[in-house]
């Protein structure tokens, strides 16, 4: 199959491949700029931009961990966009902004100011996104859903404000990082698998307009992309394969952990966000497991790093309550990647991560995905 370009709002995407937004600091200027340059859609993660070019935007020695404003720095996000534009010029670029973030509204406005063309928003239902972006009518809006019901709720709310989605991403339970399902059991149900939920979302979308459907979660190669295009999608979103590129903004120890991991090292566990998350088993996750199994509650007795909420980064965590329940702070563990604290960094990954054998350039990967191995 020869792939076709497709449109998101006014923006033409040459190849039907979106690189999923990956926080903290996994998809910034280098990765997103390179993907857009190669004709896909590069997506910049807006979470934790204060860590960009660390320690330029916040001084950890002064503040310990950053508060939400320092953490999601607008100044840094503007610089990330400028640097991505140096790579991809005027080609479309998107921002990934999680609805569960405590600074959601501020991040949306910062992304618009930074000159994003498209906003992709999941981790909750982004029902107020059209209002927040009303001064930026050229910014296309894409929700991420894991069910037809979620798309219905979003369309009902958005329609009242005169908006329909410019596209929708349907994410199934094989994806990297957080899942759109409430429990590990729900992630494993046949009825929740991507190939089942995509046709349901396509049917729901038809009731609201004619916008592209994009499948995500566990998509590996050209054959997988062809499958989702054949059943009615316009494109796919992929995360894990883009982690294993030279241009990916993650430090090399993260990429090496992906190359080294085996199928049995990838597992679904809890997260303070309240949804299961998929990650690589390592010394850190073993320590967390030990603390949970032995009911260790105090910071001084934990094998895993202490839990001290500074930033109230995600609303569902309720200032550390969720973190204490699952044994780790998500902001600290994900941002330790950027701080190069290898032993306390958490590695999100998709269920196909063990298939990564080596690093490729974004150009090589895009060619493989577009023209086959
Ligand atoms: C390391 C990593 C971090 C991620 N961070 C985010 C994020 O911040 N926001 C989000 O909406 N999705 C996030 N995702 C999901 C990806 O955007 C993408 O949808 C998913 O990885 C697709 O599944 P795949 O990895 O099997 O290709 C992340 C995925 C990975 C692997």
Image (cartoon, rainbow, N blue to C red):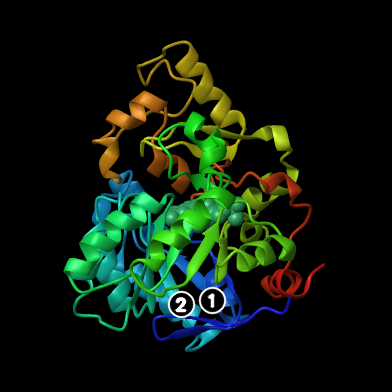
- Residue 189, horizontal then vertical, whole percent: 54, 34
Name the residue at the right extreme: 373
Q: CA distance from mark 2 to mark 1?
A: 8 Å
- The residue identified by callout 2 is 93
Q: Residue at x 55, y 57 (%)?
A: 216
Asked whether 331 or 130 is in front, the reply is 130
Q: Residue at x 56, y 34 (%)?
A: 188
Q: Quadrant of the C terminus?
A: bottom right
Mark 2 Cβ inside 8 Å of ligand 1: no
Q: Quadrant of the N terminus?
A: bottom right
- Residue 289, horizontal then vertical, whole percent: 52, 21
Asked whether 220 or 194 is in front, the reply is 194
Q: Nearer the viewer, mark 2 or mark 1?
A: 2
Q: Report the disc number at residue 81.
A: none
Mark 1 Cβ inside 8 Å of ligand 1: no
- Determine whether, in the image, residue 226 is placed left or right of residue 91: right
- Report whether residue 82 is seen: yes
- Determine whether, in the image, residue 94 is placed left or right of residue 133: right
Q: Residue at x 32, y 43 (%)?
A: 64
SS at mark 1 in the image: helix
- Determine whether, in the image, residue 186 is placed left or right of residue 246: left
Is 17 placed above or below 258 here? below
- Determine whether, in the image, residue 172 is placed left or right of residue 131: right
Near mark 1 (Cα within 10 A), the count class, few <14, some 14-19 or many ≥20, is many
- The residue identified by callout 1 is 33
Contact between labelled residues 1 and 2, with CB atoms less than 8 Å apart: yes
Going from N to C along the chain, the mark reached first, 2 or 1, is 1
- Report whether residue 310 is seen: no
- Residue 83, horizontal then vertical, whole percent: 47, 78
Q: Residue at x 34, y 26 (%)?
A: 324
């Amino acid at each position: 199959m020869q792939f076709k370009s497709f449109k998101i709002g006014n923006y033409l995407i040459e190849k039907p491949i979106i690189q999923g937004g990956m926080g903290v600091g996994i998809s910034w200027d280098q990765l997103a700029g390179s993907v857009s340059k190669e004709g896909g859609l590069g997506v910049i993660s807006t979470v934790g931009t204060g860590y960009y070019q660390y320690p330029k935007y916040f001084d950890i020695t002064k503040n310990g961990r950053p508060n939400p404003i320092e953490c999601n720095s607008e100044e840094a996000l503007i610089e990330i966009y400028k640097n991505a534009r140096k790579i991809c010029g005027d080609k479309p670029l998107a921002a990934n902004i999680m609805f569960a973030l405590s600074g959601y509204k501020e991040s949306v406005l910062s992304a618009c100011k930074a000159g994003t063309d498209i906003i992709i928003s999941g981790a909750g239902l982004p029902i107020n996104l059209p209002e927040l972006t009303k001064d930026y009518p050229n910014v296309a809006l894409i929700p991420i859903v894991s069910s037809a019901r979620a798309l219905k709720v979003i369309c009902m709310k958005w329609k009242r404000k005169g908006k329909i989605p410019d596209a929708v991403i349907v994410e199934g339970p094989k994806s990297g990082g957080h899942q759109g399902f409430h429990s590990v059991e729900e992630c494993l149900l046949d009825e929740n698998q991507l190939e089942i939920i995509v046709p349901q979302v396509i049917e729901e979308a038809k009731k609201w307009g004619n916008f592209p459907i994009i499948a995500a979660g566990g998509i590996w190669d050209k054959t997988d992309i062809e499958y989702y295009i054949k059943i009615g999608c316009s494109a796919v979103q992929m995360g894990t394969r883009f982690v294993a590129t030279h241009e990916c903004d993650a430090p090399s120890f993260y990429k090496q952990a992906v190359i080294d991991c085996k199928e049995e090292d990838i597992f679904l566990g809890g997260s303070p966000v309240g949804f299961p998350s998929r990650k690589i088993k390592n010394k850190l996750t073993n320590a967390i497991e030990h603390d949970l199994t032995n009911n260790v509650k105090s910071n001084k007795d934990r094998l895993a790093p202490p839990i001290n909420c500074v930033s109230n980064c995600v609303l569902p965590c309720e200032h550390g309550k969720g973190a204490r329940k699952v044994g780790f702070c998500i902001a600290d563990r994900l941002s330790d990647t950027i701080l190069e604290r290898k032993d306390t960094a958490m590695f999100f990954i998709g269920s196909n991560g063990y298939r990564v054998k080596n690093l490729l350039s974004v150009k090589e990967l895009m060619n493989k995905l577009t023209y086959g191995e």
